[in-house]
Structure formats: structure tokens, C-alpha cells
Image (spheres, helix red, strand yellow):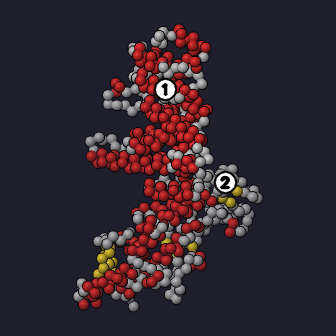
Amino acid sequence: MSLPCDLEVNVNDEQTFLLSQKILLPRCGRLMREYWRNLKAGTQSKCERAAVLRIFLDDMPGGSRAFEQVARFCYKRCWIEVRPDNVALLRSVAEYLEMTEEFGAGNLIEYTEVFLSTISNWSWKDIITLLHSCETLLPLAEKFGIIQLCVDSLALKAKSHDYCTFSSPNSNDSSNACSMSASPKSLSLNQTSGSSKLGRDSSHLSYLSLNANRSPSSPCSLDPCCTISPHCNLNSRNHHCHFKQNWWCEDMSSLSTYMMERLILALETYSIEHKYIANILLKYLEASLPLLGYSPLSVISEAGDMNGKRFKDYSQRVQREVLQTVVCLLYRLDWIAIPMKSLFELRRVSTVIGASHSCKGQVEEMIGSQLHMATLDNILVPRVKHRDRRYSCLYDVDLVLRLVRCFLRVKATKDLQAKTEGSNDIEVLPKMAIGYGGSVQSNQLETVGILIDKYLTEIAPDSLLKASKFSELAEALPSNARETHDGLYRALDIYLQAHPSISKKDASQICKAIDLAKLSFEACKHVMQNPRIPA
């Protein structure tokens, strides 16, 4: 005997469902409350109440598509296919409709919770899928702890799966096929009419058949997160196939900045090495910027196209948000774990897309703290041209000056740390002084001195380089940074040759940077015979 369609549910003004009160109301606390409220308010006539009950649901997560799945769950006697891509939505809808155990054992909240409790057995790819599905369910997914569950599980997998162990190809024991578990493509939770309250034990779980085509000679149906080394010997008796420790970098590039930030914090909590976390963030940025339109071959060719301009403005805004988020997360790490080349590339991109001053400052601080590891090619950064190009020198000398000052601040902080070692004062030192880039030793200072002398030699021929700027950079380092001043003198001589019209005052000013006592005998002879040196 068919049940009457005496319940009319309008979901977010998208779609109206005609259902049976007998099926839906006993499972949904919210619908039951609406039913009693309508009866008490008398909003419908007696005839209408006997015929059809009308309920309006506003702001329902997932809209009509989600409500349809709830209706199927109720009509199928509490059965529905739960997958990583829909479990977060079902959990949110169940909470919205108040489908708790009070309204029947094995209700939808408990149903989804049981599925989520198996997340430790999921593959990396399935957890990422679940995390993706939470993007449109904020802040509900955060409130129910689904996002925290995802990032903790991902971090735990990244920490624990250092190798993948295979069974022998000749072994018939399928239980040892692979140390990494199969992914939950779908999960069916069945409940008979006489069953008790659904528990969280695995006896209630029934997985669909996975890897049905696996042959005995195939040790494992490889999980997407497992990248096998080409040197893996499957014929050996005790074979451990090591895979890349950064195999988990490649699946995260499509996450939002919010999800990426939550994941990075979880990786830090689980003590993942910072070089791998930095690799994740750099790959994430590398994958995101081209998708957002950052490319020399821009798709926007028509300057007069208003839609193109709006898209460009939106794209640049999102680019800045992504870059600034990545830089903030990198700033939390041990800076020495970030490749110097990548840091300079971050500085270049931040300039091109107009990132905030604080973002640029953080990148420069990370570079400056380990300036001794930079090369001449790294710091030869072209200057962004001004509108009046007559007053723009070729290279960004101001940037190098800021990097040198940052390096010296780190050195001063390290010196202070050495003096206060063993006292409680060390706890209040700036963050960048402790564990970021290592200690600034005297040989590092001398390395920076040699680097700056090479830089001055390279930029000295620039006819637009002002004497005051050359002098400021030459004198930026302390006296103990240079064991010899021969390199500095060579740069000074080239500058004087390239600027024959320089005033005596300016020439005398830049010559003050030279300590004659630190010149070699040959350099001293050259100074005495050099007509460009003021008397």
C-alpha cells in the first residue's frame, strides 16, 4: 500500500518535495518541530492540515540536492551510499535537520560518524577528496571537526608512511599485500528493522569489493600517494620499496589557502621536517599562480575589454592572497629549509603582483638571515623602472642594502644570545634569532663581505648609480667583515672610471670606505699611481 504524499518541503526556494510525513518526520527533529509549530500556530486550516503539511527550509547546506539524499536515506530504511566526496555534506545536513539517535537508532548523524571513524584506513587521495568537499561547507565542516580530522589524518600518514612494504610475489597471503590500506571508494551501513543502536565497531561496516582485478603476481594495487622507487626489487626476499618522502606534495595544489594553512599547521604539529613542508608550499604556489593568470602569455590581450579588466583585477587580487598566505606559512618555518633561489623568486613574484609591504618584508628577512648562502646572480636583481627612467639605475641597490642590514640584525641578535646563554633572557629574544638560519659566525660575515665587493664591482659601471648609494653600500658592513680591501678598491676604481665627471667631494666620500692598512702591496702601489683618487 503506497503512502500518501502529505508533506510538502520547500528547500531554499530551489525545489519543492512531496513526501510522506510517516517516513520523514520520525527521523528529522527539525521537521518534527516545524510540524508541531504549525499545528500550534494554526497557520493552516483543518482541511489543509489533514491534506498536506507545508514546511519551508531556508539556508539548508547543500540545497535541494542534499535534501534529496536525506529523503532517499529515510525511504530506504536508513541506507545510503556514503563516500569521501559526500560524507561531509551528509553530516552537515543531518545536523541541520537534527537527525540524532533520539529520533531512531542508526540515524544519519551516527551513520556518517561511523564512516568518518574509519578515516585512518583511507588513502591519501580520499582524504584530500573529503577535504575538498568541505570547502563549500564552511564553517559547518569546521564546527563538526571534519577539517581537523582530515588534516590530522594527512599529517599522520605523512609522518608514519616512510616506506611501503610488499609481500612476496609468490605469497598467497593477501593480508600482507601492502602496508598501505585500500581506499574507501564507498561504504554501506546496513541496519535491519530489529537492530540496536549502531555502534562504531567495524562489524557494522561493509566495504564494496576493491581491487578485484588484482592478480597473485601483482603485490599491491598501488595507492596514488605511493611513488615507487625504480630501484625496488620485488624478487628479493625482504624487499622494502622506499618512495619519495615528498610524495604528498603533488595532491595539494588545488586546495584553498584556508585548507592549506590548516594542513601546514597540522604537519608542523606532527613534526614533519620543515624542508618537506617548504617544498609543499612552493609547489602549491607554483601550481596556483599559472591557474590564476600569472603568466608571460596572458590570456587578456584586449586592453579595452571591460570583462578582461575585471578578470585581471580579480586574478591579481587572488594571486596576492595566495602568495601572502604562502609567505606567512614559510615565515613560520626554519628559514634555512627554504632554498635561496626560491626565496629570491618569491621576492620577484611579490614585486610583480604588488604584494603587501609586510609580505615583501618577510621574504627579505628570510633572505637576509642567510645572506652568506646567496650568490652574485641571486642579488643582481634588476630595478623596477620608474616612470621617469632617467633617474633609475640598473639594479635594485636598495634591496641589497636592506638584506645586509637584516643580516647584521641577525648577527647582533646571535651575539646577544651568546652573551645571555644560560639565563632566562634567551626566552625573550626575537623569533628570527633562534633556530632560523643557524648562527652568524665570523666566516659567514666575511663571506657576505666578499659577496658585497663582487656586487659593487658588477654595478660600478652603471652611469646612473649615485655616489651616495655606492658609498652607503660599501660602508654598510663593519670593518671586520673584510680581511682585505682589495676587492672593494677594485670596485671603487671601476666606479671612478665610469663616472669621470664625479665631483671631488663625492669621490672623497666613497674613498673613505677604503682602509689603506688592509690593502695588499700591489693595491697600495696602484693607489699611489691612480690619478682618479683625490689627493
At label 2, counting other C-alpha atoms closer than 10 Å, the crowd grade (few under 14, some 14-19, many 20 or more) is: some
- The circle on residue 123 is none
Pick the residue in front: 246 or 411. 411
Q: Residue at x 69, y 61 (%)?
A: 166
Percent from the top left, x then y, of residue 474?
Answer: 49, 25
Amino acid tagged 1? Glu
Q: Is residue 282 visible?
A: no
From the viewer's perspective, is residue 533 above or below residue 172?
A: above
Residue identified by numbered label 2: 242
Displayed quadrant of residue 64: bottom left
Q: Nearer the viewer, mark 2 or mark 1?
A: 1
Residue at (32%, 31%) from the top-left corner? 387
* Quarter assignment of residue 484: top right
What's the amino acid at mark 2? His
SS type, badge 1: loop
Depth check: 101 or 290 in front?
A: 101
**For marks 2 and 1 on the same chain, the one whose residue lies earlier in the sequence:** 2
Which residue is at a point 61% across and 65% down the rendered structure image? 181
Number of marks:
2
Q: Which residue is mark 1?
A: 475
Asked if the residues shown at circle 2 and circle 1 are in contact, with their CB atoms under 8 angstroms apart, the answer is no
Q: Horizontally, is 100 left or right of 174 in the view? A: left
Question: Residue at point 55% right, 50% down?
Answer: 427
Element on which disc 2 rests: loop
Q: Position of residue 286 (x, y in %)?
A: 48, 46
Say left or right for 133 vs 171. Answer: left
Asked whether residue 138 appears in the rendered view, the answer is yes
Residue 173: x, y in percent? Answer: 71, 68
The quarter of the rendered structure image containing the N terminus is bottom left
Graded by Cα atoms within 10 Å as few (under 14), some (14 to 19) or many (20 or more), the crowding at tag 1 reads some
